[in-house]
């Protein structure tokens, strides 16, 4: 099987400089979702028909296994598939199947497509169709004695045909040889002056090729994205699906409607995630850990029995060992925290290696950047960092050391001792607060 993905449409209704198929759903382009699904079917080749904003689309997917075909001008869906056909010719045996997908239909399930391809077999045209309460705008499936005879587009349909509720989702599969016979015969003598892919149905029927239909399990699978409202709707559906998968695996979500996973979230047993958390990239959370409200966590590893948040931000390469506490308004980047360590309030920990049983006081900042280079801070086991400390990296706090509150640490703090940098406290005897002069 070969897969053709139509992605030439301009997407004017997005009102965006970004081509439609590059608009993000769960943090990555619509087209990347379609590609992931396409690859899950292990096709022999994947051909993407691109047009508007083509260079940007190609650059976004440098993968070597993709065949890119430009469609310029865009004369309709039939014309688009016709452009792909020569690129898929060379390797073909006679009975190869072509599956047509759309770059702006991101949530189609691999299992639905497997059923469609199976239904097409070696010698049938298989259409993915759906019964809709409101079929307005879609091509309608016209049947005679129960058999599909053609598809008629909304704009070309009679009043009677517009009553039909079975619609064409656009996704279909058929033998390559069929496409090779039908596509050159398409005409653009229709309401939109386009070469309709849908007209291949009547041509297949005329040849006596059976036309079969398959339905998606959920109607949102075949929903396309044309504007930002539809994009937001599919985003929520996708997030709900991911939330359902997590809960099925035993994760407790305070509210499955209020979680955003833009990447891969891997959770152990008895993980709890409160509302409003955003996960990006690859995040791992160990058994028994709790993520409190409104955390942003990207490419991080969280051990067992940790507490993170509320309002914590874990940036890439944050690694928390077991039983680590990260509290409110703490930002951590490219740092590791050893077991039982705590940074509970208002801190920035960047490029730091922090041992076990360390207490990082409120307001502690690692000054990791000197304006040109980044430097590491090392805090060894059982150190105690007093509140409002600045650790000017590169710097090391030795094992069991205590750093006094308000210290600006510019040299290493030796193990087991108290180090502090602080102006001596003075009290000015007899000092009087100024008072306002009385105006005359
Ligand atoms: C198409 C179907 C219609 C179906 C509907 C489902 C045809 C003629 N009609 O209509 O039966 O109900 O989808 O949404 O196929 N595209 C190209 N090149 C082109 C034209 C389109 O790549 O020259 C791509 C678009 O980017 C888009 C897709 O094909 O992703 C569908 O094109 P569009 O013009 O929106 O078709 P519809 O009118 O929605
Ligand atoms: Ca459309």
Image (cartoon, rainbow, N blue to C red):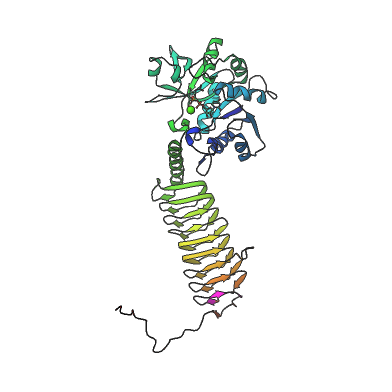
**Spot occupied by residue 352 in the image (x, y as percentages of width and height):** 58, 65
**Spot occupied by residue 6 in the image (x, y as percentages of width and height):** 56, 29
Query: Which range of residues does the magenta coloring cover?
Result: 402-411
Please determine whether, in this image, residue 14 is positioned above or below residue 289.
Answer: above
Q: Quadrant of residue 334?
A: bottom right
Q: Residue 385 colored magenta?
A: no
Q: Residue 403 colored magenta?
A: yes
| Observer-nearest of 421 and 203 | 421
The quarter of the rendered structure image containing the N terminus is: top right
Which residue is found at the position 48% from the left and 37% from the top?
15
Which residue is found at the position 50% from the left and 70% from the top?
359
- Report the number of discs: 0
Residue 206 in view, yes or no: yes
Q: Quadrant of residue 137?
A: top left
Please determine whether, in this image, residue 123 is positioned above or below residue 261.
Answer: above
| Observer-nearest of 229 and 332 | 229
Farthest-out residue, front: 440
Which residue is found at the position 48% from the left and 21% from the top?
213
**Spot occupied by residue 275 in the image (x, y as percentages of width and height):** 40, 52
**Spot occupied by residue 176 in the image (x, y as percentages of width and height):** 62, 20
The quarter of the rendered structure image containing the C terminus is: bottom left
Image-based side of 418 in relation to 256, left or right: right
């Amino acid at each position: 099987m070969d897969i053709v993905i139509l992605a030439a449409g301009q997407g004017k209704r997005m009102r965006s400089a970004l081509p439609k198929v590059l608009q993000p759903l769960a943090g990555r382009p619509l087209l990347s979702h379609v590609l992931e699904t396409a690859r899950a079917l292990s096709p022999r080749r994947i051909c993407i028909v691109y047009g508007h904003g083509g260079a940007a689309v190609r650059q976004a997917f440098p993968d070597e296994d993709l065949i890119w075909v430009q469609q310029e001008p865009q004369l309709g869906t039939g014309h688009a598939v016709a452009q792909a056909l020569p690129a898929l010719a060379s390797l073909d045996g006679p009975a190869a199947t072509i599956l047509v997908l759309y770059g702006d239909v991101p949530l189609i399930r691999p299992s639905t497509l497997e059923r469609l391809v199976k239904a097409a077999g070696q010698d049938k045209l298989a259409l993915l169709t759906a019964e809709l309460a409101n079929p307005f705008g879609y091509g309608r499936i016209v049947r005679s004695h129960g058999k599909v005879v053609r598809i008629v587009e909304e704009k070309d349909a009679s009043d009677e045909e517009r009553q039909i509720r079975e619609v064409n989702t656009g996704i279909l599969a058929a033998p390559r040889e069929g496409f090779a016979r039908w596509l050159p015969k398409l005409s653009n003598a229709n309401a939109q002056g386009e070469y309709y892919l849908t007209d291949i149905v009547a041509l297949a029927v005329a040849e006596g090729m059976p036309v079969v239909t398959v339905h998606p399990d959920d109607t949102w699978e075949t929903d396309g994205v044309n504007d930002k409202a539809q994009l937001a709707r599919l985003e929520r559906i996708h997030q709900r699906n991911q939330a359902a998968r997590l809960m099925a695996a035993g994760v407790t979500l305070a509210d499955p409607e209020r979680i955003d996973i833009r990447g891969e979230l891997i959770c152990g047993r008895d993980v709890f995630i409160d509302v409003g958390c955003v996960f990006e990239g690859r995040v791992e959370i160990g058994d028994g850990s709790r993520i409190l409200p409104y955390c942003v966590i990207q490419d991080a590893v969280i051990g067992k029995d940790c507490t993170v948040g509320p309002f914590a931000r874990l940036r890439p390469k944050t690694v928390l060992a077991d039983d680590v506490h990260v509290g409110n308004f703490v930002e951590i980047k490219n740092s590791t925290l050893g077991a039982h360590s705590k940074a509970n309030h208002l801190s920035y920990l960047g490029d730091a290696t922090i041992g076990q049983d360390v207490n990082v006081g409120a307001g502690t900042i690692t000054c990791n950047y000197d304006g040109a280079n980044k430097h590491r801070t090392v805090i060894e086991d059982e150190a105690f960092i007093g509140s409002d400390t600045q650790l000017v990296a590169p710097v090391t706090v030795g094992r069991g050391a205590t750093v006094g509150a308000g210290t600006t640490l510019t040299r290493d703090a030796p193990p087991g001792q108290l180090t502090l940098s602080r102006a001596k406290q003075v009290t000015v005897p007899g000092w009087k607060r100024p008072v306002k002069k009385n105006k005359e």
